[in-house]
Image (cartoon, rainbow, N blue to C red):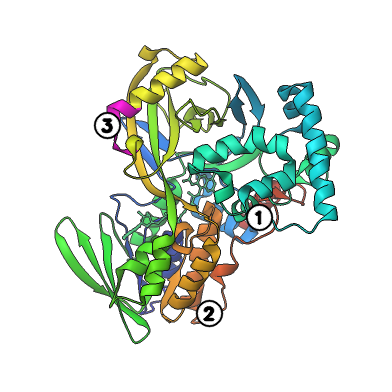
């Protein structure tokens, strides 16, 4: 193995930080990954409790980037399987397919609502052709794409449950990243022509058969094998800079504090935390902009159940406000390698804010809350089918795109850009609504910049595509990639 001597400190052991660390370690650089949790993986972990493995929320791998896909297949090899996806929306005691299938949606909501939906949609299209519109908010975005009726039925309730606030307070950018290019016309086209030129990546996805956490676990194993270091249970508390360079970090673990010097630093910790940890303190203006950045937190609840295939869904979006959880996933519909025979794990998500009344409830209270609600609403299991429950609290799960956030983020990043040996990567690290592939891609770019001693890999160019994230206008793109990979292997 080629030996290089750059010492790289990586802040955060999620997918972006680990991907950077893995590439750098492969290139022979000295890597130390600092992770505050006891385990790597960040937002994409698989937790094991008494023989049950469950993911921290539904994570399917799909990407439009062939290089990143091949990279994942190289990393995990035959651990990767294809999982058929069935995801539905639940409200008014009915299930609807998601992504929306036009006729299913129109029949499901009944004739009057369906007529209203079509009229509203036409109205939205005509309006957008005649008037130049200044679309700012999440509500503007959805109405422009789907019309008011479908927005109110399919998007408003869920979005407000997720964000805990009015859709008019959230930037249209979020809609752009989730559903740009998706509108009724594409739905009709998909329905009528069965995706001849618009192939969805949603019917099937790649997945590590022992859980999404294998991505991070495997990278950490490889980094250690290549003489890199992974320090879990280690929080970065100070980031020391001098003359436009980061010099060192101060970390805290169970044993106390330590200082660590490096030549290069890659940060995937939340952007606002990074700013606050810089010593000496930076301009007040930047600190106050960082203080404006908000994140939405989440409580995840796993129920271990003596039953299998309770539904056929990989996950279900649950819209009604009176049901406390917003999504429920069923692990045995992902693979049969995650739960002991004859059992499954249901994973519920409740978006909330750290310190609010839900966050402060005891684990038992939260487990009882979701168990009662699930049994009452769906009538699919009985109380004694549930053997036990487990609660996982996740701070800073979603960056909140408040109105004007991108101007604030832009100014913060411009300021941080003056630190020559610092790169920002990842979902909270760049304050961008990344999927796993985006975070990996950012990590790969950051590593390449250091390995090749260049700045030509533009991390900010990742995850700004204008297409709907779940679609690609190439036939059978996933199969094509796997085929490509198989050919290369042989
Ligand atoms: C519920 C849910 C479902 C999702 N579903 C999908 C999906 O279906 N498909 C998909 O592709 N993506 C999905 N994602 C997104 C995916 O999980 C993320 O994009 C990806 O895991 C982010 O990795 P990251 O490295 O950018 O960030 P993170 O995972 O947040 O990693 C940052 C790490 O930094 C650590 N850290 C923070 N502060 C400090 C500190 N001061 N010192 C040391 N360490 C620190 C954190 O503990 C964390 O481990 C989903 C996310 C969630 C939450």
Label drawn at residue 64: 1
Which residue corresponds to the image point at 49% horizontal and 13% vertical from the top-left?
379
Examine the image and state in which quarter residue 222 appears: bottom left
Which residue corresponds to the image point at 83% horizontal and 41% vertical from the top-left?
122
Task: Give 429 or 63, whichever is nearer the viewer.
Answer: 429
Name the chief secondary structure element in magenta: helix
* N-terminal label among 3 and 2: 3
Which region of the structure is painted magenta? 359-366
Q: Which residue is mark 2?
A: 455
Q: CA distance from mark 3 to mark 1?
A: 41 Å
Q: Name the spot of residue 109 as percent of width and height, x first.
A: 71, 24
Q: Are marks 2 and 1 in contact (CB under 8 Å)?
A: no
* N-terminal label among 3 and 1: 1
State whether residue 52 is above or below residue 73: above
Q: Is residue 250 left or right of residue 374?
A: left
Q: Is residue 33 left or right of residue 109?
A: left
Determine the secondary structure under disc 2.
Answer: loop
């Amino acid at each position: 193995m080629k030996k290089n001597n750059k010492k790289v400190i990586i802040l955060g052991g999620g997918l972006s930080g680990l991907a950077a660390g893995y590439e750098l370690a492969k290139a022979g650089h000295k890597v130390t990954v600092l992770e505050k949790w006891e385990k790597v993986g960040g937002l994409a972990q698989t937790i094991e409790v008494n023989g049950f493995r469950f993911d921290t929320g539904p994570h399917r791998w799909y990407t439009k980037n062939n290089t990143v896909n091949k990279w994942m297949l190289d990393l995990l090899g035959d651990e990767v399987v294809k999982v058929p996806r069935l995801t539905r929306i639940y409200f008014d005691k009915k299930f609807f397919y998601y992504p929306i299938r036009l006729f299913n949606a129109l029949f499901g909501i009944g004739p009057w609502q369906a007529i209203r939906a079509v009229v509203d949609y036409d109205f939205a299209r005509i309006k957008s052709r005649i008037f130049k519109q200044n679309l700012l908010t999440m509500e503007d975005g959805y109405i422009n794409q789907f019309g008011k009726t479908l927005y109110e039925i399919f998007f408003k309730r869920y979005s407000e449950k997720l964000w805990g606030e009015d859709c008019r307070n959230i930037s249209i950018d979020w809609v752009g990243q989730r559903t740009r290019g998706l509108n009724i016309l594409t739905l009709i086209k998909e329905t009528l022509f069965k995706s001849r030129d618009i192939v969805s990546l949603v019917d099937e996805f790649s997945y590590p058969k022992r859980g999404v956490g294998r991505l991070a676990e495997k990278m950490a194993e490889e980094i250690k094998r290549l003489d890199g270091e992974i320090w879990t249970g280690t929080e970065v508390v100070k980031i020391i800079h001098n003359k436009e360079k980061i010099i060192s970090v101060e970390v805290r673990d169970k044993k106390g504090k330590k200082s660590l010097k490096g030549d290069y630093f890659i940060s995937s910790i939340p952007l606002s935390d990074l700013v606050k940890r810089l010593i000496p303190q930076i301009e007040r203006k930047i600190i106050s902009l960082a203080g404006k950045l908000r994140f939405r937190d989440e409580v995840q609840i796993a129920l271990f159940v003596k039953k299998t295939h309770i539904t056929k869904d990989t996950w279900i979006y649950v819209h009604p406000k009176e049901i406390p959880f917003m999504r429920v996933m069923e692990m045995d519909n992902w693979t049969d390698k995650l739960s002991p025979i004859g059992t499954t794990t249901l994973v519920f998500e409740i978006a909330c804010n750290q310190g609010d009344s839900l966050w402060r409830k005891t684990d038992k209270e939260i487990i009882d809350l979701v168990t009662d609600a699930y049994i009452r609403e769906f009538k699919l299991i009985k109380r004694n089918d549930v053997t036990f429950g487990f609660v996982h609290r996740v701070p800073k799960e979603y960056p909140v795109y408040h109105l004007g956030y991108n101007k604030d983020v832009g100014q913060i990043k411009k300021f941080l850009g003056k630190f020559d040996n610092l790169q920002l990567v990842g979902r909270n690290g760049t304050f961008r609504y990344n999927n796993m592939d985006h975070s990996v891609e950012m990590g790969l770019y950051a590593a390449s910049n250091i390995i090749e001693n260049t700045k030509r890999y533009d991390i900010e160019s990742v995850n700004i595509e204008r297409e709907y994230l779940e679609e690609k206008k190439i036939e059978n793109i996933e199969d094509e990639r796997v085929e490509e990979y198989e050919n290369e292997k042989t």
